[in-house]
Amino acid sequence: MRTETPSSPTPRFLLQPELPVCQTDLPLDWYQEEFKPYAEEYLALPNRRPETLFRWLDGYVKPAQAHFGDGLLLLAHFYMGGEIVKLVEHYGGAVADSYQLALQARNRPEKRVIVESAVHFMAEAIAILAHPEQSVWITNPKAGCTMEMLAKDYMVLPVADQLVERYGDTLATVAYMNTSGRLKALAGRTGGAVCTSSNAHQVVAWAQKCGRRVFFVPDEHLGRNTAHKLGLAPERVFALPDPRRGQIVLSALDLERLDRAELILWGSSCGVHTIFTPAMVRHWQARGYRVLIHPESPLETVLASDGAGSTNYLWSEFERAPRGAKLAIGTEGHFVRNAHQQGAARGIEVVHLAEIPGSTLGGCGCATMSRNDPPHLAGMLDLLRQGRAPEINRVLAGDVMNELTMGRERLPESERLELVREARVAMERMIAVVEGRA
């Protein structure tokens, strides 16, 4: 895995002038008060064609870019709903997966103001590795992650305490990137590391070589796929109960099985990726398609596919596909739609894995990430330029956001600095493992 900053000297995402942007308009009452004027202007635009949208966005983005100069950095994730990835790239921003986004502040200290159009845990990961003079902002604080919502610190930490009490220093937490900074800090102080979907097997293998039992948080499916990739027998893997069923108490579990486990899985998952089935894979393979899937999907579906990997892997495989290739991709719907549009221009056929006869799940996108839209981008940049940006949009390490109520819990500075130290240790450990330095 490379750690350099991704760059896009030539656009990867194409906006077709004759087509309206694919962006679902949000109701006005979904916006923070400070953002409503921008939303009203956007909703009043005569159409969503690129020339109309850019004419409006230019009035806010370009003054902000002139004001901040080279100190401004725009970021977006591959999964962003609608056309935000194309808009961010159009204005010189970076589009990447969560791992590459997390490295942006760390590797680009000259960027003093970082504006992210993605979800909260991604912005927080950037803030953990940020330099003291950098500030990180999210265009919509309500943009969360269902997987992370099922692994809040108040759910996980009591279970981690029980596991540490039982196994002591032999336990190491491996925290997937899709976790809060508080869980990344847990990984740091238990001798573990952060991981991504592309390097989870490397990080878990490293922990095993160190003689550690691994507590893998939060995605059960990525955990099972990682265990299979490493050749772990099923009896060496223990999945904790679904956290939605209530408090987890170890004494109520099968302790004999738990004690035999080398990998203990938290029971969270991604609603976008759990819909994929082996039947979907077989449907497209029978029609000559190569099936590629994200490893947050169920193990049996991943095993049936032709390839599995992170969003960066999926996009790279698409970019390398020759003319005439047929790909069925199992991941977030907006990602597949972008690949489909660009593939058509290159003579490559791309379909969404779930789009089979009788299925109502085709094109499933990340609804929470789609809460970032053009009015949020325009408003965030304009308010920052004016020095009136809402504090709720600023992201600091350790922040816990309630994506439903907009309530936020922020740590005192001394506690935040300690969290940053622990979480950064876990993230740097991941980088060291991937680079072969650990």
Image (spheres, rainbow, N blue to C red):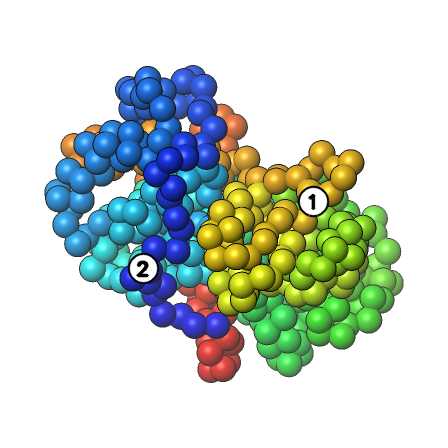
Residue at horizontal 27 percent and vertical 59 percent from the top: 131
User: What kind of residue is marked 2?
Assistant: Thr
| Residue 240 drawn at (x, y percent) | 75, 52
355 over 238 or under it: above or below = above
Q: Residue at x 69, y 53 (%)?
A: 297
User: Which residue corresponds to mark 1?
Assistant: 354
Comparing 256 with 51, the one in front is 51
- Kindly identify the residue that appears in the image at 46 percent across and 65 percent down: 427
Nearer to the camera, 146 or 296: 296
Q: Which one is earlier in the sequence, the residue at label 2 or at label 1?
A: 2
Q: Are marks 2 and 1 in contact (CB under 8 Å)?
A: no
Question: Does 176 sit left or right of 134 as displayed?
Answer: right
**Is 20 drawn above or below residue 15 in the view shown?**
above
**Kind of residue at disc 1:** Ala
Callout 2: few (<14), some (14-19), or many (20+) C-alpha neighbours within 10 Å?
few
- Residue 10: which disc? 2
Q: Secondary structure at mark 1?
A: loop
